[in-house]
Amino acid sequence: MKLLRAISLRGGGTPWWIVFLLFGPSECWASIGAPSFPLAGAYFPAWLICLFIGGVSAALLRLVFMVLHVDGLLRYHLVTYLSMGTMLGLFAWILLYGQ
C-alpha cells in the first residue's frame, strides 16, 4: 500500500515524469524480442545455449584446476566455479549474439 501512495500521480508522491524516465526505456525492449534459434522444429531461447556453455566450461575449469593442483588452494569452490561459469556464459553471449 505504501508503494502505491509513493508513486501516486495526483500529488504528494513521485512526479509522473520520474516514473516515465524509469519505465520508459523498457518500451523499446519489447519490440526487439529475445534471440532464439531453431532446434528440432522448436525455437529455443539463446540464453539456454549460453547457460549450457557456462555450465560445461565451469566443469571443465574444475577438471583443469584439479590437474594443476589449484583446486586445493581455493576456499569457496561453489562460488568460484559458479562465478567462472557465469562469466564464460556471458562472454559466450557477447561473442555469439553481440548484445
Image: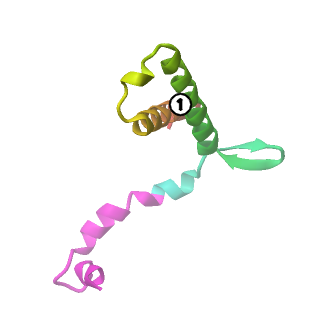
> How far across and down, in percent of the image, does residue 45 sit?
65, 47
When the figure is inspected, residue 70 is found, relative to residue 26, above or below; the finding is above
Residue at (52% x, 34% y) in the render: 89
Residue at (74% x, 49% y) in the render: 43
> How far across and down, in percent of the image, does residue 12 sit?
16, 83
Position of 90 with respect to 56 (left or right) is: left
Residue type at mark 1 is: Ala
- Residue 74, quarter of picture: top left
Can residue 57 be seen in this snapshot? yes
In this view, the residue in front, 84 or 29, is 84
Mark 1 Cα-neighbour bin, 10 Å: few <14, some 14–19, many ≥20: many
Question: SS of the residue at dot 1?
Answer: helix
When the figure is inspected, residue 36 is found, relative to residue 74, above or below; the finding is below
In this view, the residue in front, 88 or 6, is 88
Can residue 97 be seen in this snapshot? no
In this view, the residue in front, 16 or 84, is 84
In this view, the residue in front, 24 or 37, is 37
- Residue 40, quarter of picture: top right
**Does the segment drawn in magenta span residue 44?**
no
Residue bounds of the magenta highlight: 1-27
> How far across and down, in percent of the image, does residue 35 sit?
62, 45
Residue at (60% x, 31% y) in the render: 56
In the rendered image, which residue does mark 1 sit on?
58
Which image quadrant: the N terminus?
bottom left
Q: Residue furthest right?
A: 41
> How far across and down, in percent of the image, does residue 3 sit?
28, 79
Position of 30 with respect to 11 (left or right) is: right
